[in-house]
Amino acid sequence: MGLTVLMNAGPWLSVPPRGYGGIENVVATLVPPLRRLGVRVVLASVGTSTVPVDERITVFAEGQFGALQRPYNQVCGVAQAHLAAVVRELHARDDIDLVHDHVEAVGLATLAAMGPDAPPVLHTLHWDLTKHPELYGGLDGGDRVRVNGVSGAQLNRAPKALLKHSVGHVHLATPLAEEAHRRPRMAKGGYVLVLGRVNPGKGQDVAVRLARRVGFPLVLAGPVGPYHRPADLAAAGDDARQNPDVRYFHDEVVPFLDGDRVRWIGTVAGRDRDILLAGARATLFPLRWEEPGGTAVVESLALGTPVVAMARGCLPELIDHGRTGLLTGDEEELADLVLAADLLEPDECRREAAARFTPAVMARRYLALYEQLRRLGSTPRLHAA
């Protein structure tokens, strides 16, 4: 095919990330099958990225995620420095057929501002689209700049100007879904797992209250603010409470932790995370927000663990109620559904993941969008001076 795509992952974390990193995990999942389909990938990321690609653009040797905890006027140049290098690269060469951008707000704004002679841009929206109303409400990228969502529910919340640039949605994928239906069963433990960053939108306070009231063992796995291990959070002391997620954790979650039946274990990565997820009787998503993508949901299905969740955001698109999970609109009903999850068949979850959520499925969908973008707009190139 000879298609060359500049994949802009941003300056925050490596691809793949070490531990937590949603967007960077998506990019790491997408790039290998794209290359197997014949796409040349030029990755714009940080120096510690290890995913195999054809070329790299790097400004920062290491991920700058920690800088996000600093005041805006100290960190506002990080993303701009990264985007400036991307723009310079586009000006300096004429072989980039398309830019696939994943950098929130500044990626879309910068690439749209390059004008009609720049390559086509597909900007993937990984977040809540009620953010950035001024940017999204006034977007005008012409035929050159298009956006896609990670679920239909997410795009349903898009402002009109943003929706006019939409080419649809692509559900997220996981390498765990490859041959998932052929994976041997793993013995289930008695615990329920909540996996993800600890914050009010994810609803860990709901989970701990239900676990204590009903009596099921509960494990919370994921970072609290910038702290990935209980020891790190303890060592930070009271100063850590300046972070709103840390305040939420201490005020709403900690009173229900007992270190035995209800516990927070911090971030778990790699094989340890997969074992923890596969061994859970169910994963619980007591969401208070409209979840846009649901990476942890498709990972749970791929490992044969049914999902119990609030029917919010993308969850009804990913879960077949009564077969691969149980959904409700009532927080209090979640406890009963956790107990009923034992009746669901783990093999059904794995079969669903293998059919719908593999990297190859996601890559073919994106390749179709790339070709659609090239047909929608003209594709003149910026030439080096």
Image: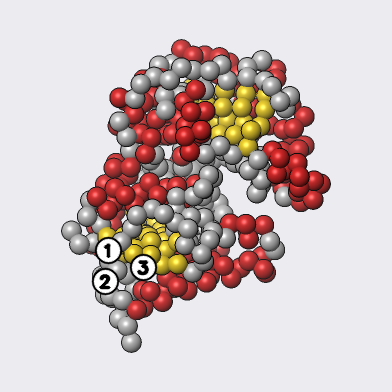
Closer-to-camera residue (137/255): 255
Q: Is residue 374 above or below residue 115?
A: above
**Tag 1 secondary structure:** strand
Question: Could you say which disc has been placed on residue 95 in the image?
Answer: 2
Tell me which label, 2 or 1, sits earlier in the chain: 1
Closer-to-camera residue (148/349): 349
Q: Residue furthest left?
A: 1
Please tell me which residue is depicted at 76% across the width and 38% down the height of the picture.
250
Q: Which residue is mark 3?
A: 142
Tell me which label, 2 or 3, sits earlier in the chain: 2
Q: Residue furthest right?
A: 238
Percent across and percent down for residue 63 are 54, 59
244 horizontally vs 329: left or right: right
Figure label count: 3
98 horizontally vs 327: left or right: left
Contact? badges 1 and 3 (CB < 8 Å)? no
Cα separation, mark 2 vs mark 1, equals 7 Å
- On the image, which quarter does residue 331 sit in? top right
Please tell me which residue is depicted at 24% across the width and 50% down the height of the picture.
36
